[in-house]
Image (tube, rainbow, N blue to C red):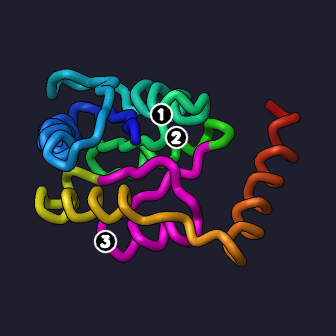
């Protein structure tokens, strides 16, 4: 599985730790930036990851900012993206099992390193359950199609 990864300045340090963790787990990734803790605009980095996942260049994406909220909101603007803000392993598991989330967002100011690593591990290893959940995911896709004509 190939992972697209990015952060803003607030998430930079945690992103660097997650990169090493992904290497330990044997995942291939691409770091779309930022590459320092100098102030940047999170939508720019959310867009890079979200577009690469939507185009199927990467199977999944991970985004980290201060709270995780901004990255999540920005990524979800890209058609085909189902970004989930997770700060627990239970949220990570459910976002994959029930919602087929393809982008994980986390808040570096709200999530410690151990928890973040646990969330990433669970999120990457949990499969979509399908069945009754597929109908619901397809309804989300239908909403996306309905409103894309306004863009």
- In the depicted view, which residue is nearer to us: 45 or 138? 138
Residue 99 in which image quadrant: bottom right
State the separation of the CA atoms marked 3 and 2: 21 Å
Tell me which numbered mark, 2 or 1, is placed earlier along the sequence. Answer: 1
Q: Secondary structure at mark 3?
A: helix
Which one is closest to the eye, mark 3 or mark 1?
A: 1
Crowding at mark 3 (Cα within 10 Å: few <14, some 14-19, many 20+): some
Q: Residues within 10 Å of mark 1 (few under 14, many from 20)?
A: many
Residue at 39% x, 36% y is 2
Q: Which residue is mark 1?
A: 58
Circle 2 residue:
75
Query: Mark 3 or 2, which is nearer the eye?
Result: 3
- The local crowd at label 2, few if under 14, some if 14 to 19, many if 20 or more residues have their Cα within 10 Å, is many
Residue 61 is situated, as x and y percent measured from the top left of the image, at 42, 41
Q: Position of residue 104 (x, y in %)?
A: 41, 51
Residue 150: percent from the left, percent from the top?
85, 34
Residue at the image position 43 percent from the left and 45 percent from the top? 70
Side (left or right) of 100 relative to 63 = right
Q: In which quadrant of the rendered image does the C terminus lie?
A: top right
Q: Position of residue 10 (x, y in %)?
A: 21, 39
Residue 113, labelled with which disc?
none
Pointer 3 or 1: first along the chain: 1
Mark 3 lies on residue: 89
Give the residues drawn in magenta, as a range.
Answer: 81-106
Q: CA distance from mark 2 to mark 1?
A: 14 Å
């Amino acid at each position: 599985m190939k992972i697209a990864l990015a952060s803003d300045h607030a998430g930079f340090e945690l992103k660097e730790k997650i990169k090493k963790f992904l290497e330990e787990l044997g995942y291939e990734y691409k770091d779309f930036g930022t590459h320092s803790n100098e102030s940047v605009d999170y939508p720019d980095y959310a867009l890079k990851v979200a577009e690469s996942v939507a185009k199927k260049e990467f199977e999944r994406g991970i985004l980290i900012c201060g709270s995780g909220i901004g990255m999540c909101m920005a990524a979800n603007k890209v058609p085909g993206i189902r970004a989930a803000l997770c700060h627990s392993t239970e949220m990570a598991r459910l976002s994959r099992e029930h919602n087929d989330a393809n982008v994980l967002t986390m808040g570096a100011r709200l999530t410690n390193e151990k928890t973040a690593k646990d969330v990433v591990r669970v999120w990457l290893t949990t499969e979509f359950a399908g069945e009754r959940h597929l109908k619901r995911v397809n309804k989300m896709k239908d909403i996306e199609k309905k409103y894309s004509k306004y863009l």
